[in-house]
Amino acid sequence: MDRGSSARRGLAGKVWGLLRLIGFGQALRFAIARLLRPRSLVQLELPGIPHPVLVRAGGKDIHCFWQVFGNGDCEVDLPEAPRTIVDGGAHIGLASIYLANKYPNATIVALEPDEANYRLAQRNLRHYPQVHLVRGGLWHRDALLTIDNPEAESWAFRVREVRDAAEGGIVGRSLDSLLEELGLPHADLVKLDIEGAEAEIFARGAPRWLHRVTGLIIELHGRRAEAAVHRATRRLGLARSRRGEKVIFIREARAEA
């Protein structure tokens, strides 16, 4: 089978899966909005999720919606329920919604650098007081950042460090300093979809927080990021697997003495 046929089969499977997930009526309403009002917001309801989710009719929000709620990219089996979760690259808040419903007693810190994504995430997360949404990006240290590819799709923004606010005013935070500021001792589960910034975070050795993390869900972007994450995690006793576009690391439960 050629790549074109495989891609078409994959797309057909995704469309059918989305129909089953949200139902024909909602799917039709979304398709009409996408065709006639691509800048509008569409409200989607999901079984098991008590509050509707807003997505933009145009662009790739619906793809991200499917990844989280249909494909289960953030579905992990942890030895115990996490108390603190970090959602790095929160986009419009979809992963945080999923995790807030799966782990209702957890505190979630979600970071998103883009203004438009952040504003929509605010609306999606307003029903979840346990989620603390921060306008900013994760980095290997506290610094100022800017979006390096503003022409990209909303889910693909890449950040880089700048010297002063005239070049860019996005706050970049190290996870260690962010947790300290919020009075959180550590992160049990960390999800990273930060479009290559993971290379900067992990290339400087295993971050301090990584030694205490129970689960890590990460989308790797490029060979440099993959090599950096491999070096930082290889001696930490984390079991590695893959789900969709995400690589998952889980610290295996230690046997009791």
Image (spheres, helix red, strand yellow):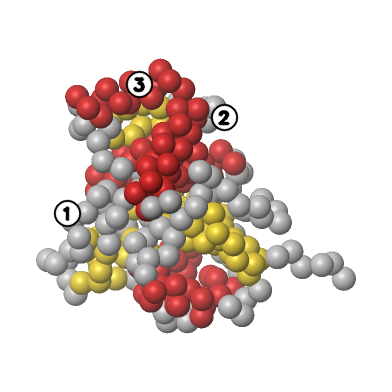
Could you tell me the amino acid type at mark 3?
Answer: Leu
Say whether residue 16 is visible: yes
Q: Percent position (x, y) of residue 20? A: 50, 27
How far is disc 1 from disc 3 in space, using C-alphas? 29 Å
Dot 2 corresponds to which residue?
48
How far is disc 1 from disc 2 in space, using C-alphas? 35 Å
What residue is at 26 percent from the left and 25 percent from the top?
33
What residue is at 39 percent from the left and 22 percent from the top?
26
> Which class describes the residues within 10 Å of circle 1: few (<14), some (14-19), or many (20+)?
few
Side of 166 relative to 250 (left or right): left
Side of 88 relative to 31 (left or right): right
What residue is at 41 percent from the left and 58 percent from the top?
193
Dot 1 corresponds to which residue?
151
Quadrant in the rendering for residue 136: bottom left
The mark closer to the camera, 1 or 3, is: 3
Q: Percent position (x, y) of residue 242? A: 55, 59
Q: Is residue 148 above or below residue 58?
A: below
What residue is at 22 percent from the left and 54 percent from the top?
152
Residue farthest to the left?
A: 166
The mark closer to the camera, 1 or 2, is: 1
Could you tell me the amino acid type at mark 2?
Answer: Gly
